[in-house]
Image (cartoon, rainbow, N blue to C red):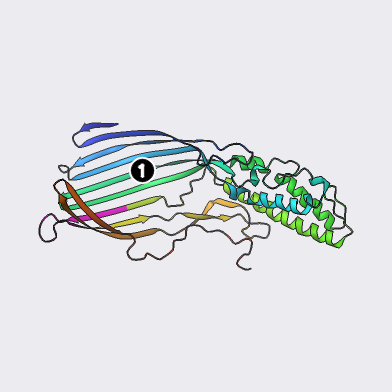
Amino acid sequence: GVYHAFSWLSLTYSRSNNFLPVPNASWVDALGRSAPNSVGQTVDYGLRFSLWQGKVALGVNKFETSADNQARNANASVGGTRAILNRLRNNYKIPGDSYFAELAQEGGYPVDTGNVSDTWSYVAEGYEMNLVYNPSRNWRVALSGSINTNKLGTHLAAVGTYLYTDSNYQGLGTWKKFASELRKVEAGQASSIFALNPASDPARTQAADDALFIEQQTAAQEKGYLDSIALNGVTTSRSGKYALNGLITRAFHEGKLKGWTLGGNYRWRSAGNIGYQRLPNAAGAPAGTIDVSRPLRGKEFWDIGAMVAYQRRVFDHINLRVQLNIQNLPNWQTPRLVRADYDTQAIYGT
């Protein structure tokens, strides 16, 4: 809707409600439920000014976009689960341990399928400004800027329910119990679950290896989930909160350069969050879950570009335009750091 309050001022309002079918019909969540369809809404309202006899157009808008039940691939959130289940199958079910006789074959649980999804919700809001100045028909100057925040809402609810609901073979509590029972065998004691002979050196070695594997995978699985849930209700600003764009073009309508247009542009983004500091463990090392109150900042980003175009009439009512755009002229090969974390597993050395 547009309301022209005066010849130089208009009020604008727009609203859209969106429906997005699930992107993959075979997706199910960790509890075996089919992925839902997503719904969303955008509301935008603002002011438009027409100044200096139409040579200047200025628009200021406020927007809010929300989305619920966005189905996304969540296989990375249950990778440790699949590793644990496969270890139990290979080392205990297949060799004939009676306790694991009812453990489903590979692919028998939703988390095994490789089609695991979960839902996310978010709210993005902010302000936009657009300014266009046409001093003559040959020149055009445009500026735009925005302030935006993106707040992450409820997400990974199904994964959380799955991890903290214990069954015979699944759940964080169950896996921690398995590791504890294997540690008994390692120490020469009989287990109430595993049919390993505590008097056998190979059995004790296997128990130690499997206990360590399950402990590591369980800890990583839980840590990854808690890291993600810590962002619930947090404004992430991974792409930066502020943005500014500029454009200037010069068109030639007469003379030797008739039909040519030259232009340049500028783009700037403020520094975004590339990660978060981690809470210290008992030894003071940053090995805990992320501390959302202490974000790690990236660097601001900017580039300049150029444009050249040529237009001419080829038939009575047909114009042909050829245009070349060049983005990021001065520094096109430099990588931009977008994600950072602590090497808590000493992958790159001590």
The amino acid pointed to by label 1 is Tyr
Q: Nearer the viewer, residue 196 or 55?
A: 196
Farthest-out residue, left: 255
Residue at numbered disc 1: 127
Instruction: Give 280 or 43, whichever is nearer the viewer.
Output: 43
- The structure residue drawn at horizontal position 57% and vertical position 43%, both measured from the top left corner, is 117
Q: Residue 210 occupies which quadrant of the picture?
A: bottom right
Residue at x 43%, y 52% (from the top left corner): 239
Residue 306 horizontal/vertical position (percent): 27, 60
Residue 169, position as x, y percentages in the image: 74, 44
User: 218 left or right of 326?
Assistant: right
Report the span colored magenta. Answer: 245-261
Pinpoint residue 343: horizontal percent, then vertical percent: 60, 62
Up-down relation of residue 188 to residue 132 (above or below): below
Residue positioned most to the front: 315
Return the residue nearer the eye: 59 or 263: 263
- 117 over 201 or under it: above or below: above
- Estimate the x, y position of residue 217 in percent, counting from the top left: 68, 54
Q: Is residue 8 visible?
A: yes
Q: Residue at x 35, y 39 (%)?
A: 62
Q: Is residue 259 magenta?
A: yes
Q: Spot the residue most to the bottom.
A: 349
Element on which disc 1 rests: strand
At label 1, counting other C-alpha atoms closer than 10 Å, the crowd grade (few under 14, some 14-19, many 20 or more) is some
Residue at 78 percent across and 51 percent down: it is: 94
Badge count: 1
Quarter of the image with the C terminus in it:
bottom right
Left or right of residue 211, residue 135 in this image: left
